[in-house]
Image (spheres, grey):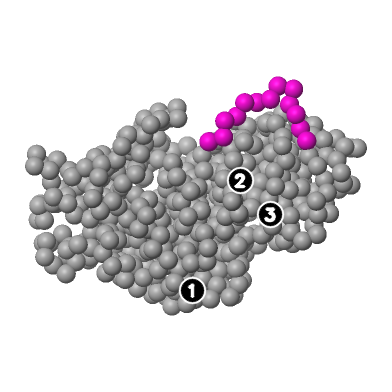
Amino acid sequence: MTEWWRGGVIYQVYPRSFQDSNGDGIGDLPGIIDRLDHIASLGVDCIWLSPINSSPQADMGYDVSDYMQVDPLFGSLQDFDVLIDRAHALGIKVIMDQVVSHTSDQHPWFRESCFSKDNARADWYVWADANPDGTPPNNWLSVFGGSAWEWHTARKQYYLHNFLTSQPDLNYHNPKVQDAVLDVMRFWLDRGLDGFRLDTVNYYFHDAQLRSNPPLKSLNGKPAVNPYDMQSHQFSKSQPENVAWLKRVRDLLNDYPNATTVGEVGDDERGLELMRQYTSGSDLLHMCYSFDFLGVKFSAAHFRSKIEAFFADNSTGWPCWSFSNHDVIRHMTRWAPHSVSPADLSRQAVALIMTLKGSVGLYQGEELGLQEADILYEELTDPRGIRFWPEDKGRDGCRTPMPWQHAMNHAGFTTGTPWLPVKHAAAALSVETQNADPNSTLQFYREIIAWRKGQPALLTGSIEFFETDEPVLAYRRSAGNKDIICVFNLSAEERVITMAGTAVELEAVSHNAVFEGKALTLGPNGYALVEAPAGEGKVSYRAANPVEVTPS
């Protein structure tokens, strides 16, 4: 058994938007198979497939109605088998979303459960009586707005839904539910799948006493667009019973050599703490990610504080860092105020994530430098965006189709009408265009991923930060007798940094960096990556007027 995942690079494919093979405007498994060569050319270790299970698609597949079938929108089980075989032949592993904190209300389990209070699956979901005045049992709120409780007339009870009303939560306090979910996972592992990305991994358990959540002490300056963000979710998620369940998941995965797990931790208050807890030791999840690097914060203090907090006290946990995914505004748009050139920002961002300690998650289109698409209200499909427009435009802007060929209709994604539009700005960054340009963002992604694979210090080595003022982030990655010193200028203005104690020769993947004597000049979003003997080299930078940054 190898730990290929530790320091590995995982490429997220959002199937609806990757490649359509049949002209219905929705990407599918045959389309992914046709584009596997592109993914292989990046040099990544693994593909993460967003949901492909049978679903009414109320939340774009995150509402599963049959865990053991592929939705006809995406193809068939036979297509899935072909995808696994082709990917493995290219040296790429495949993991897929397991959305098992909740199901669709069309799932047979829920249809049986909601029929009566005494059927075989009566307590497979979270049911509760109304208060004497008919109101829900507590104040828990849904991520998508409104109460997290929905009245069901047949049961004459409320059921819990942390997301849409059509996404009832499973009751993990029932061991039979846990057994059934493990059977689902075993089904896919037996077909050759290499593991799972576990959606909302901290939502499995709720407080059995159904205690109400307290208010959040502070919104930290955020506008209260969604009432969900006004509560401290102490009782509706992130419960201590979750740890024992995750041990059962790991016990199953241990029966499949090289299989892995990546847990999504959705908790603004305790994200890093839960990441550490869920991955510490060898009997829990392999990796987790939170939303700490998926927001607007872009400062040396922010990145340093999160890395140091995760690895504090010699934590044995392991993170999988991401800057973009299908749930957030693309980082090329979020962090644009800190740059003057998209090309410089894209190179700096990938160099940063490739040199932080942990595994790496890349989101499709990131390798092209795609920015968030400007989606009109009439083009929306995301229920969150429809509910909270215009203050929260939802997630459609990061989910638009991949642009493959600039001159083709819909950039070669489909011969039909795409489910979300392909905007002109994205089409101009097509794969075809960037393949023809040796200096493109795409070509740089290939170069730096290949370079990283030859650096043991970056895969599993330790990390030590230098004391520098904003906007300079500097750290040392160490393994064996060789270090990699990493220095980043996280601003749109030139900075001069002092490097001493070692002969400095910049690695070819450095960018906007010039070294003369002891002076390292970094242009806008410039960075330097330097190989040095173990323990040698020192980086210092003191700003004339230091930027005040409060770590979050």
Comes first in the chain, label 3 or label 1: 1
Q: Mark 2 points at which residue?
A: 308
Q: Distance between the residues labelled 3 and 1?
A: 26 Å
Type of the residue with mark 1: Asn
Q: Distance between the residues labelled 3 and 2?
A: 11 Å
Which labelled disc corresponds to residue 336?
none
Q: Where is residue 313 in the image (x, y as percent from the top left)?
A: 59, 51
Query: Is residue 137 in the magenta section?
Result: no
Residue 429 in view (yes/no):
no
Type of the residue with mark 2: Glu
Element marked by disc 1: loop
Q: Position of residue 501 (x, y in %)?
A: 87, 44
- Between tags 1 and 2, which lies in front? 2
Q: Main SS type for the magenta part?
A: loop
Q: Which residue is drawn at 35% across and 58% down?
A: 241
Q: Distance between the residues labelled 1 and 2?
A: 29 Å
Q: Which of 522 and 34 is in front in this view?
A: 522
Q: Mark 1 points at which residue?
A: 254
Element marked by disc 2: helix
* Circles 3, 2 touching at the beta carbon (< 8 Å): no
Q: Which of 31 and 517 is in front in this view?
A: 517
Which labelled disc corresponds to residue 462?
3
- 422 in relation to 297, above or below: below
Q: Residues within 10 Å of mark 1 (few under 14, many from 20)?
A: some
Label total for image: 3
Element marked by disc 3: strand
